[in-house]
Image (spheres, helix red, strand yellow):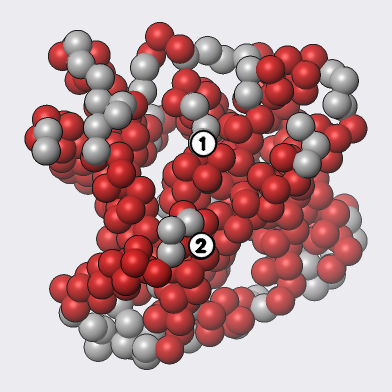
Amino acid sequence: MNLIPWLIAAFTVFAVYYLDKWENKYLKSIFDWVPAILLAYIIPAIISTIMGQSFANDEIHQYSKSYFIPLAIIAVMSSLSIKQLISIGWKPVLVFLAGSFWIALFPVVMVYIFQESHLVTEIFTKQEYWKGIPPIVGGWIGGSTSQLVLKEVVNCPENIFLTILILDNILVNIWTIFMFQGIKKSKKLNSWLNITNLEMPNELPKKTESNIHPIICFICLFLIVLITNTMFDSFISKIVFLSIVGLVLSNSLHNWNYSFALKFGSILILIVMSILGLKLSFSAFNIELSLLSFLIIWLISHFVFMVFMAKLLNINVAWVSIASMANVGGIATAPAVTAAYERKWMPHAIVLAILSMATGTFWGVLTIYLLKHII
């Protein structure tokens, strides 16, 4: 076994994780625009380039696909509480799902309508940039976990994946600023749209304080992944099975350690990204402006569609910004944006963000299936 790629990945994860936690205003400003997940991907590539070595075909990648990614999936899925989700109410959840639906289906519809356009024939088809669409769907709905899974499912090339990561990072940061301002204008939008249902959602049920020890949780998750690897050969079958088992764990064991599962999942994502970075070659990097324009239209239309749903359901427009950030921003930014409107809703935003993490892979698989029948 070649230890060098393992050492590079380990160094990257420890460095990024602790720098991200370091309370330094300069570092914080850097991580506001260049998130840990992107650094974890780029640093191994920089080290490999400096060393003049390629680890693209090293066996570490098989370990990642067989163990680290499946562990990340079951950890994230086991952090979702169905009871808390129900307590939010069906209307906010429906607005959220409408946003997810639009993210997953918009590119399929656009590719179908504009099949003869330069973007579709040259960029998406000839240059295979369509393989970058499912990771975007996964990133915008499920976050990094789904993004990584869908990259493997669709076999997205590294140069396209790097382009997607950078564009995604830029757009999400700008989108967060817009959502911060948008949620502050909710009262005016409610009045303009004649929305009258401005009730507060129910308080979320409390989770038990007597949780299973993290070591026991880890052993449980690891053993399930080992068993799953012996049961299934298909990567997709493993992911579907582990997702179901994760939900069963979190909603059948009353003292399941939700917080550990979520934190463990986030660390595993850094590990997987650092290993993927060992495949990256900067020489193939390229940004297509037409792709950027497509992503901007995609993101804006996602928001417009959710506003339409809020009007249809007569529900506070503030839920549109919250749902959008739960989809696109994730568990870190969704509660922060929510706090700009109503701090009591922050726990609800976190639950929606976890729902996003739990469902992103399935939306992305749907996108892949539909795109393959068009392109």
Q: Residue at x 52, y 24 (%)?
A: 160
Q: Residues within 10 Å of mark 2 (few under 14, many from 20)?
A: some
Query: Does residue 295 sit above or below 21 in this rendering?
Result: above
Specify which label sits upstream in the sequence, 1 or 2: 1
As drawn, the label of residue 64 is none
Q: Residue at x 37, y 88 (%)?
A: 253
Q: Residues within 10 Å of mark 1 (few under 14, many from 20)?
A: few
Q: Which residue is mark 1?
A: 155
> Where, by quadrant of the figure, is residue 217 drawn?
bottom left
Query: Does residue 302 sit above or below 33 in this rendering?
Result: below
The amino acid type found where label 1 is placed reads Asn
57 left or right, relative to 197: left
**Looking at the figure, which quarter contains the C terminus?**
top right
155 left or right, relative to 117: left
- Numbered disc 1: secondary structure: loop
Q: Residue at x 82, y 59 (%)?
A: 309
Residue 331, image x, y percentages: 45, 56
Would residue 240 be seen by someone viewing this image from the given angle? yes
305 left or right, relative to 194: left
**In front: 228, or 269?**
228
Q: Which residue is mark 2?
A: 237
